[in-house]
Amino acid sequence: MEISSWYRDHFEADLKGRYIHLKSLIPLLKKYHEKIIIESAGQSELGSDIPYFIIGNGSKKVLAWSQMHGNESTTTKAIFDILAFLCQDKVYQEAISTFLQTYTLYCIPILNPDGAIAYTRANTNGIDLNRDAINKTQSETQALWQLFNEIQPDLCLNLHDQRTLYSLPTGKGATVSFLAPSANAERSLTPARKEAMILIAKMTAYLETLIPGAVGRYDDSFNEHCIGDSFQKAGVPTILFEAGHVKGDYARERTREYIYYGFLSLFDIIETDSTYSVRDYLAIPENQKFYRDVILRDVCLDGKLVDVAIQYEEKLLDDAIYFEPYIDKIGDLSNYLTDKEVAVGKTDILLNSHENVFETAKVSTVVNKNAINEVFFKDSCITF
């Protein structure tokens, strides 16, 4: 059976959309209790449990964590997709058996449960856990470091989402991005960092067969306050995953599938035909920030022709994620990519029935000033 066919029929359908929190996961962890060990890494600042699961009994120990930023849930869905795959007994049994005998995976599905329930990047104290590596002021950070020190992993996977801002020199949005974080300010190619680079190159090679030109890498400036940089500095190969955007897929359901394939290639469940090098990693194009959700082209504003970029801001409302549009950028955006391009036709516009058009303004409607029945944009209240 093709791996993609299995995925379409068996991915973890009980997890969907953007709003994923601990209550969503507890029943799923219990569902797999016969195949996994469930432990607690500690408690959040508000006293919520931080569970993790263990699967496999191999000598290579892998520590993975998702939703360090509470509003970044795509990789959490992919974790449960891979768990569903590893726990089934129908296909790829030889490869799964090899994985279980080779690796022991320790995985925290939600490191920041308070941020997840509030759908915020930071924890309940407003602290970005990914900037707390040195001070370790928060209980969530302490729990991760304690587990890291306890198991002494051979590989760390730092799992995140990235905004739709990111594009690539290939002319496409960055659907998946990776980084082998630097271990010092000189960005030295330490043994741990080289290993992370080679593993990323392997995943990228496979993903390029599925989403050509849509895999990127982050800038590798060193920040000792970041968890990934700190673990790399400690000599443990660490890989940053960033789940990005596929055109039209604001629920990130297609992106989760690509992260799932990344996991399969990382662990050699999907075999690759080549060996990879640091040079292959460095050949991955770096992320740019030339993608916007909506761009209005050829808008007449103050007697000049400009483009107007509209971006969505995610907000939690009644247990659903609402995408609120606002004006992000005005100017010559001819080199920008977009999910939706609207040709205004060199005319003046009214924003929310007013002539005042400015960056940061919230957007309800954009209409032709000279023909108000011609609507260029209307807030469609996207929710997930």
Image: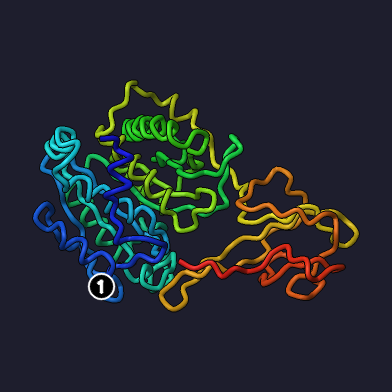
Binning the other alpha carbons within 10 Å of mark 1 as few (below 14), some (14 to 19) or many (20 upward) gives: some
The quadrant holding residue 366 is bottom right
266 w.r.t. 290: above or below: above
Farthest residue to the right: give it: 303
Q: Secondary structure at mark 1?
A: loop
328 w.r.t. 236: above or below: below
Q: Nearer the viewer, residue 255 or 100?
A: 255
Left or right: 93 in relation to 237: left
Q: State the quadrant of the N terminus.
A: top left
* Residue drawn at 46 percent across, 41 percent down: 185
319 w.r.t. 167: above or below: below
What is the x, y in percent for residue 102?
15, 35
* Amino acid type assigned to the residue bearing label 1 in the image: Ser
* Residue drawn at 18 percent across, 55 percent down: 53
Q: State the quadrant of the C terminus.
A: bottom left
The quadrant holding residue 207 is top left
The quadrant holding residue 372 is bottom right
* Residue drawn at 49 percent across, 42 percent down: 218
The mark total stands at: 1
The residue that disc 1 covers is 48
